[in-house]
Amino acid sequence: MSLDNDPRQTVAERGLVRNGNSTTVQNASKPSTPTRKPKSPKPENAVTIAVSPRVLFHMEEEQQVYETQGMEDYIRFQKEHETEPLSPGPAFSFVKALEAVNVRLRELYPDSEELFDVVLMTSNHAHVGLRLINTINHHQLFIERFCMTGGNSPIGYLKAYHTNLYLSADSTKVREALEEGIAAATMFAPEKMTEVSEAQLRVAFDGDAVLFSDESERIFKAHGLDKFFEHEKAHENKPLDHGPLKGFLEALGKLQKKFYAKGQRMDCPIRTYLVTARSAASSGTRALNTLRSWGLEIDEALFLAGAPKGPMLEKIRPHIFFDDQMFHVEGAAELGTVACHVPYGIAQRVGPKKQVKDTETPMAAI
């Protein structure tokens, strides 16, 4: 299902986005606030996505000011530039796709609150809030919920917001969220992002240590590939335990079923992918049996038998891809995919030699 060859949609209807900016013609001037805002759903009813400003927008210059000049100069800089909107970051297209799904859901279920809800979650001071609000209004995003904690970690608020997924540029905060049982990932921005669709949300998951537990990966790390195959064959009818993002896939599945109930399975604006290094014949059965035992569907399953994931993801063009190994995250990013690292499981202790430098700071980075 390529967004380039769908005869049902024009380019404008598909809403192609490159680097977060629409390729269609836009008005030079935009209203300071959106003219129409839908009602926000109650947190307990919504699929809540918490994002940090550093992944929603590009804030490299602001981060540099904080790191080199300190907090007071950082706040002063933000206040002096608060009428200048920030440019879209790696999570921008993902958030726009969430909003497109909400439009379709409201058309089918006008009174339902089973919708995506985005919360801006940051340890920034409230002084910075005006620039963030102005930026959100400039880009006409529907983000009504903010959490600005003035230097304290925002992680404790995630459960209060009923968060289903937390995305940040700060790996320490992501680990804290995972320890609290909240699906979370560190988002990285490729230098040049692949065009993605605003009309269909596409989410790609690795299997082991992302959707599933790291049980099988532990066998592989400890005993090698042959023992791994033996273990999977012997346990192919025993479901794997859940991994950190199983709940997010489940939440996506519940929204997909709302479209299926209206006869829109083939026109569903949510599509999910399993992109795994497992081999189909040797170890794929257990993965698919596990999903079936959970009552979850995956739209497409790609068993790559150890082949690089980047080229497949370049074809899929997901808004977001989750993997527990930096090797795969880096490979995806090199080919233009917005990839997220899930720091969970045995791979974090027996990790790749190449590590991404963590330059995050407690205030401005999250």
Image (spheres, rainbow, N blue to C red):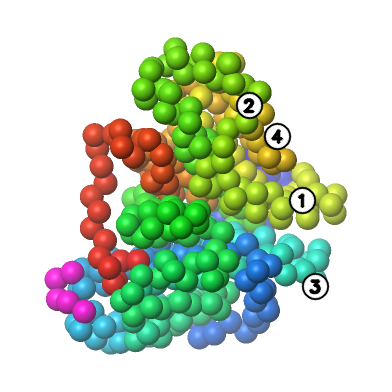
Q: Quick one: SS at disc 4?
A: helix
Q: Residues within 10 Å of mark 2 (few under 14, many from 20)?
A: some
The residue tagged 2 is 238
Q: The residue under label 1 is which amino acid type?
A: Lys
Asked whether 208 or 223 is in front, the reply is 223
Please tell me which residue lies in front, 180 or 343.
180
Which of the numbered marks, if any, corresponds to residue 292? 4
Foreground: disc 4 or disc 3: 4
In which quarter of the view is residue 7 placed?
top right
User: Which residue is painted at 27% across and 68% down in the image?
Assistant: 362
Please report whichever mark, 4 or 3, sits nearer to the chain's N-terminal start: 3
Q: Are marks 2 and 1 in contact (CB under 8 Å)?
A: no
Q: Which residues are magenta?
A: 67-71
Label 4 near label 2: C-beta < 8 Å?
Answer: no
Which quarter of the figure is the N terminus placed in?
top right
* Mark in front: 4 vs 1: 4
- Dot 3 crowding, Cα within 10 Å, few <14, some 14–19, many 20+: few
Q: Residues within 10 Å of mark 1 (few under 14, many from 20)?
A: some
- Quadrant where the C terminus is found in the figure: bottom left
Residue at the disc numbered 1 = 257
Q: What's the mark number on residue 111? A: 3
Kindly identify the amino acid type of the residue bearing the numbered disc 3: Asp
Q: Earlier in the sequence, mark 2 or mark 1?
A: 2
Q: Quadrant of residue 113?
A: bottom right
Labels 1 and 3: the sequence-earlier one? 3
